[in-house]
Amino acid sequence: MNLDAELLLEIDDRKVARLSLNRPTLHNAFNAELIAGLSTALDRVVAERCRALVLTGEGDSFSAGADLNWMKAMIASSEIDNRNDAHRLGALLRKLDSLPLPTIARINGSAFGGGVGLIACCDIAVAVEHAQFGLTEVRLGLVPATISPFVVHRIGFGHARRYMLTGERLDALSAMRIGLVNAVAPATQLDGHVNDLLDLLLAGGPRAQAEVKVLLRNVQIHLGDPDSLDQVTADLIARLRVSDEGQEGLDAFLNKRTPKWRA
């Protein structure tokens, strides 16, 4: 699927979706139209019952964040217009973060600002070894406000304090050290690493993986209330054990056969 030429969506026969930012001459920077297109594409991925999503960029960059022309337009816009614009980006990030299927950021090049936000919203991130990263908003007199909930959750307050305040660049190994990315690979091995992860993900039950993402959010919400947390986790595992997928998975394991979702 070609979404206005600046966004590419492909779904293969395994129901793996590959969503590519396709503005290579602009380092895959995004504007209001691309944000709307990404939101529509994520809805399509869910509607198609995809098993996994790979988010990447075309060309040499993953995403440089905000498009310069978009930023110029925002300078001339009112505070209300800027607030509404930020809400649309926040809604996209929230949708990606809570997508009910596993997501992999295939980081083919550098990512800055909002591009880092997209990475932080993916479940797993694999970066090419020459990629660089930065939360550089303070150098423009701004802050990474809209992406901050997701970035802080990903790398923690300590690292966020440093990198949001300094605006310094990180190399790929440093990004892995602070938890922004999970693995670093040479360019020639990036796709192989992503494919290995997909093989692992496709071995799991799709409903179970969607529930894992809900579980992790609930653990965070109820962490200070042990009784509530125990109730939530007990209810979840009981519900899944008697579900069609849970019954299929347990039967397949006990009878040493391949579960239906893998077939």
Image: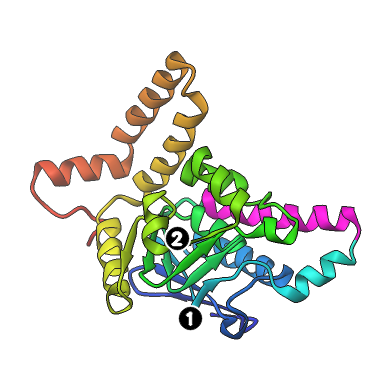
Q: Nearer the viewer, residue 12 or 69?
A: 69
The colouring scheme, among rainbow, by chain, secondary structure or one colour, is rainbow
Residue name at image x 43 percent, y 16 percent: 226
Q: Nearer the viewer, residue 133 or 94?
A: 133
Residue name at image x 72 percent, y 57 percent: 88
Residue at the limit of the structure toward the top, as seen here = 227
The stretch drawn in magenta includes residue 92: yes
The reply, left or right, for residue 88 in relation to residue 158 is right
* C-alpha separation, residue under disc 1 versus residue under disc 2: 30 Å
Q: Is residue 205 above or below residue 62?
A: above
Q: Amino acid at mark 2?
A: Arg
The stretch drawn in magenta includes residue 18: no
The quadrant of the rendering that contains the C terminus is: bottom left
Neighbor class of circle 1 (other Cα within 10 Å; few <14, some 14-19, many 20+) is some
The reply, left or right, for residue 150 in relation to residue 52 is right
Position in image of residue 259 (x %, y %): 20, 52
Q: Which residues are magenta?
A: 78-98
Position in image of residue 189 (x %, y %): 27, 74
**Residue 49: mark in rendering:** 2
Neighbor class of circle 2 (other Cα within 10 Å; few <14, some 14-19, many 20+) is some
Residue name at image x 33 percent, y 30 percent: 237
Q: Is residue 64 above or below residue 80?
A: below
